[in-house]
Image: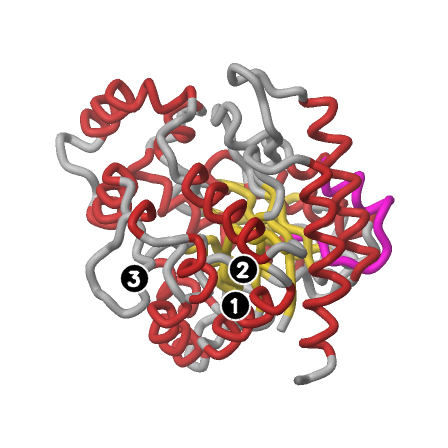
Amino acid sequence: MKFGLIYEMQRPHQDFEVNYEALIEETLEQCQLADEVGFDYLWFVEHHFLTTFSGSSAPEVIVSALAQSTKKIRLGFGVVVLPNHHPVQVAERIAMVDQLSKGRVDFGVGRSLPYEQLGLGVDPSLSREILEESTHIIPKIWSTSGNFSWEGKHFSIPERDILPKPYQKPHPPMWMACTQPSSYELAGKYGLGVLAYDTSSPSNMEPHIRRYKENCLSSEPVGEFINNQWASFTVAHCGENNEAAQSKAGIALREFFGPNRPYTSHREDVNSKLFEAWGGVAPEHLATYFQKREKGETDISGGNKNPTDLSEISDNLLSERGVTISGDPSSCINGVKKQRDAGVDQIIMLMQSDQITHEETMSSISLFGKKVIPYFNSDK
């Protein structure tokens, strides 16, 4: 079992005003501590316009700084939003950070949300096509010696020598952000690791993980090798007081999906623009996800096929079912076991939150590293 921290880059704020100087300093300090106490991965998202929810608009900058200030921990892009960028520039930047870190980079791909896409002039109905084409282009750039060229639907690249190449040979491990069964299938088809940004209980995710692993056996990898790892997202908090730590994680989880963000006030206007761009009907591959998020639903019922509202489940039950990894070290160990038994290879934990102070996050990282990670490293 591998352990990672995922960063949206959040901190407690007042009247939706974020102190970014403090946020950046705190993030670096937390990540350096995670490296020291035995975490395996750091993951940074890419988001735009999501005031208070995410300050990680330029993850390559933060990851580059961490490449110099950490020693062992792997540095994950979770993810680069490919429709926002030209694939040549993505290949160059990821390779450069991989060189800086001496081969500690993992490369995740995704396409973000329509709200952000519209703000950057990206047509949401084309985002999947662009994602898939770029996902094929980038590893070919890395594995091509000398001039590279490409002629496709969205990109035309004349013969050019694209440098540098990654430190890792043939290239960094590749992952895909996934939120629904169709994306799990796509990741398996292309031989990409899964970054499952979902809050379903491990018991609900188990059949998806099993099918994904089976699909990887017959995949047609876009890269030079298959990365058949499954990483599951969860909110986490480890503390000496079991009830208090579970409460902190439960509050952070509810607020993570809550409506109390400045950008949600524009939702109706954004929706009208989206449906206009889609000709009045959302594309099939976005419809289910879009509707689920609009209703604020998440499937954490632990066996019930119907989605369950977060507010209906207690903090203790969220922990017991492994939806959150929270509580004292013993409770955290039990939550990790449920994830492991479902087939999860890595847990990517959101410990930094705008509901939790920097000091509390540092304490959680330290305690988890000292009490929880060693339990699994000892093969118990």
Q: Amino acid at mark 2?
A: Ile
Residue 301 is tagged as 3
Mark 2, other Cα within 10 Å: few <14 / some 14–19 / many ≥20: many
What SS does tag 1 mark? helix
In this view, the residue in front, 265 or 72, is 265
Query: In the rendered view, does 17 fall on the left or right side of 113?
Result: right
Residue 337 in the image: state x and y as whole percent. 54, 75
Q: Amino acid at mark 1?
A: Gly
Give the image quarter of residue 125. top left
Give the image quarter of residue 179. bottom left
Q: Which residue is mark 1?
A: 335
Pointers 2 and 3 in contact (C-beta within 8 Å): no
Residue 31 in the image: state x and y as whole percent. 75, 46
Q: How is the image coloured?
A: secondary structure
Magenta stretch bounds:
62-76
Q: Is residue 354 above or below residue 306?
A: above
Q: Is residue 88 visible?
A: no
In this view, the residue in front, 252 or 159, is 252
Residue 325 is tagged as 2
User: Is 379 colored magenta in this rendering?
Assistant: no
Q: Is residue 282 above or below residue 243?
A: above
